[in-house]
Image (cartoon, rainbow, N blue to C red):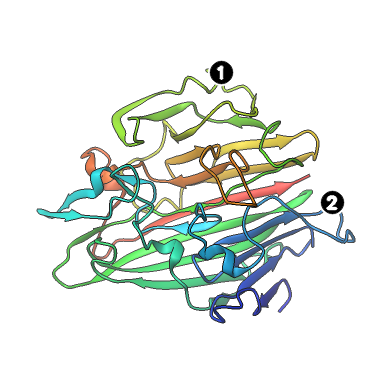
Amino acid sequence: MTGYAVNHDFDKSDPANKLHVLTTPNCLFTASFTNRGLAIVDLAVKKTPSDAHFHNVNLGFSSGEGYKRTDNPYFGAFVGRVANRVRDGKFELDGKSYQLAQNNFGHCLHGGRTGYDKIVFRDPEVLPAPSENSSVQLQFTYVSKHLEEGFPGELLVVVKYWVEDAPGGGALYLEYETTLIGPDDQDHAIVNLTNHSYFNIGDKPTIEGTEVTLTTNQSIEVTDTFVPTGRIVRHPLVPADLSTFTFGAEEPDLDNAFVFSDSDTSALDTRSFPLKTMASTYHPRTRLHLKGETTEPCFQLYTGKYTDVADLYGARSGFCLESSRYLDAVNKPEWKGMVTIGKGQKYGALTKLSLYY
């Protein structure tokens, strides 16, 4: 099938964990994903179709076995059932209290100990290309059982990936859809999905020298254990006029959720909304651009301070742009609607990652 290939030897220890590769019709851009955690392994571009090699900007491992390492910091992973943190691993829903794993500073992080990043998804259904400038769509599905990792409700989770031509490169689309399918006596569930890729568009082991332009400097104020105070404030390390700034060797040190002030924070399915730019990044040595866009109301910008993968990656080896709902939204009455799904409703989100010269 043109533009789609499968590597069956990516994971010698698990034949179900294959590498699925999509390439744009213009042959300038490719993206690949594993069954395990639907992790993005490659996000790569080349200057001309005749070039021998793609330049990969996505951090990860060379084989499927690497993604099972205990020091894997969610490289490329599809994260859920609830991305980011749930304060103290606790929340209430429909009059019942739930206790989750407390796997990060006493809070529940990225779905708990066995989140979606560790699930081996079945092979995808291959759907037609949405346009003549796109690849086919890969549709992965998963039934997330009631009380899996302590979360109530049985969910049908659908993830679609496809790539599209862009001038000088291409773009990857990530689409998420979730419905509550059971049990009969469960009226609501909570969900907040994201992708946790780390990017390095430079030519050195760290992100130093990357030029960054954000479209918002409004962030969710957090405590020293990274849960929200409830206030949205201007971030002091982002220029007030939203001018371009540069990642240095150690500064700015960011691990913050930035919000779009004009977002509909009550929306459960944002896919019909226009894409908004999270960040535009550029590196003058490689001349590579990476732009992230999303329909979501929020994104986490993380500069990788705690990235430490023995013999491969150190601190600030990549930065993350994690589109999502507000962190710990389930514990804030004014935010809870954006993560609470009921019977007959759909949770939906769309994100676009563009890489080009």
Name the residue rendered at 55%, 46% in the picture.
Answer: 308
Residue 219, placed above or below residue 40: above
Q: Relative to residue 93, is residue 54 drawn left or right?
A: right
Whether residue 333 is visible to the viewer of this picture, yes or no, is yes
Q: Position of residue 188 (x, y in %)?
A: 21, 60
Packing grade of label 1 (10 A; few <14, some 14-19, many >=20) is: few
- Which residue type does callout 1 highlight? Asp
Q: Position of residue 14 (x, y in %)?
A: 54, 79
Q: Relative to residue 225, is residue 183 drawn left or right?
A: left
Q: Quadrant of residue 46?
A: bottom right
- Which residue type does callout 2 highlight? Lys
SS category of the residue bearing label 2? loop
Query: Residue 308 or 287: which is nearer the viewer?
Result: 308
Q: For mark 2, what is the residue?
A: 47
Query: Residue 298 or 36: which is nearer the viewer?
Result: 36
Q: For mark 1, what is the residue?
A: 241
Q: Dots 1 and 2: beta carbons under 8 Å?
A: no
Q: Position of residue 141 (x, y in %)?
A: 44, 73
Q: In 3D space, how far apart are the residues under numbered discs 1 and 2 (Cα atoms)?
A: 33 Å
